[in-house]
Amino acid sequence: METEIFAFDETRFSEVLIKALKNNQVIFRDGVAYWKKGLESTGIIQHVPLKKVQTLTSETFIKSLGSMQSSLQGTIVAAQAISTASIMMATIIQTQILSKKIEVVRSAVLQVSQTVNEQNILFYTDKVSEYLSVVQNLKLVLQSNEDIEVIESLANSVLAESMQLKSHILFFISNLISLIESGQIKDKQHLGLILKFVQQMMEILPVGMHLEHILSHRLGQYQLSQTLIEDSHQKYATLLTNYRGYLNLMNNRIKAFELETSEVPYFNKIKQPALDLIANQIHVELLEKPAREQLSIPKKVS
């Protein structure tokens, strides 16, 4: 799968932006350079155009994002390292990489719903399917060239639906990890399918959360946008800690010969994708760093 990488066109940076970058006074968000909070200057410095810098090929979504991240940090001027998340999301919005990933996740959801015939799980797999559609809609709204004022009602509706469904998904995944840890799921085939599903959702959630954050920002909901990303970061970090805890427990039990590798074939299948997820730290770029950033947004004069 080939993915084009976009970056900010540094040849079109204003002198003010170049100086601000050198002084570490800039935050990029949704293609716009802002002054950091707490400075004498406030608000927008410059709207920055994008350019295509290269194309990369990778087998999986998370490796694509990881390759994208390393390529950006290695081939673009150092000043743009602080805008990795903004550029990554611009690439995701402008290409088909997210759509292809959503189809992979849909397949994992379908396998769980068709195999694990429990009413509670079926209820939430339906919610997951709805959430994937909403993530696609978030991308489409952000990709649109329509003025945000024209599609404000639609954008707010998609945003509200995303927030609601995201809460269901986080609760569902947390419960699944608890069920797996407690040993309540006995069937190894079911365990394998559920773990595959959890892994797929852990990969796509940071992207959906960041798209939500960007759309809220584009709608001029600056405080809500910041609250959303801070809340998403905290909840995802908790989920990732629990997921990593289970993976470490299983790995340690295998190392201690408490379990034979043949007893847990599902763990072997999920181990490398999970290591890729943790090693690439996409969640740091898309959730943790934006959660720490504070923009200076001038108050509107009534």
Image (cartoon, rainbow, N blue to C red):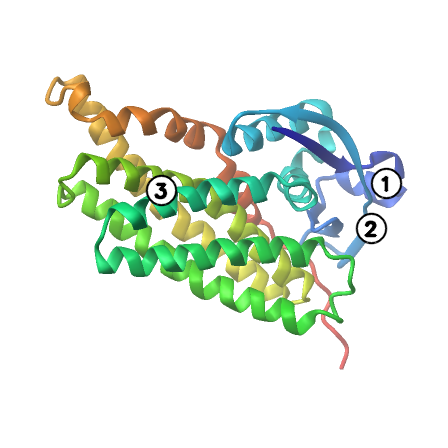
Residue type at tag 1: Phe
Residue type at tag 2: Gln
**Count of marks placed on residues:** 3
- Element class at badge 1: loop
Q: Which residue occupies the foreground of this view, 74 or 99?
A: 99
Q: Left or right: where does residue 21 sit relative to residue 248?
A: right
Residue 188: where, in percent of width, then height?
Answer: 18, 34
Residue type at tag 3: Phe
Give the mark nearer the N terminus: 3 vs 1.
Answer: 1
Question: How far, Cα to Cα, is label 3 from label 1?
Answer: 43 Å
- Residue 197 is labelled as 3
Residue 243: where, in percent of width, then height?
Answer: 31, 39
Query: Mark 2: few, some, or many residues within 10 Å (few <14, many ≥20)?
Result: some
Residue at 31 percent of width and 55 percent of height? 172
Q: Which residue is mark 1?
A: 13
Q: Closer to the observer: label 3 or label 1?
A: 3
Residue 74 location, quadrant: top right
Residue at 39 percent of width and 60 percent of height? 127
Question: How far, Cα to Cα, is label 1 from label 2?
Answer: 8 Å
Q: Left or right: where does residue 26 sit relative to residue 243?
A: right
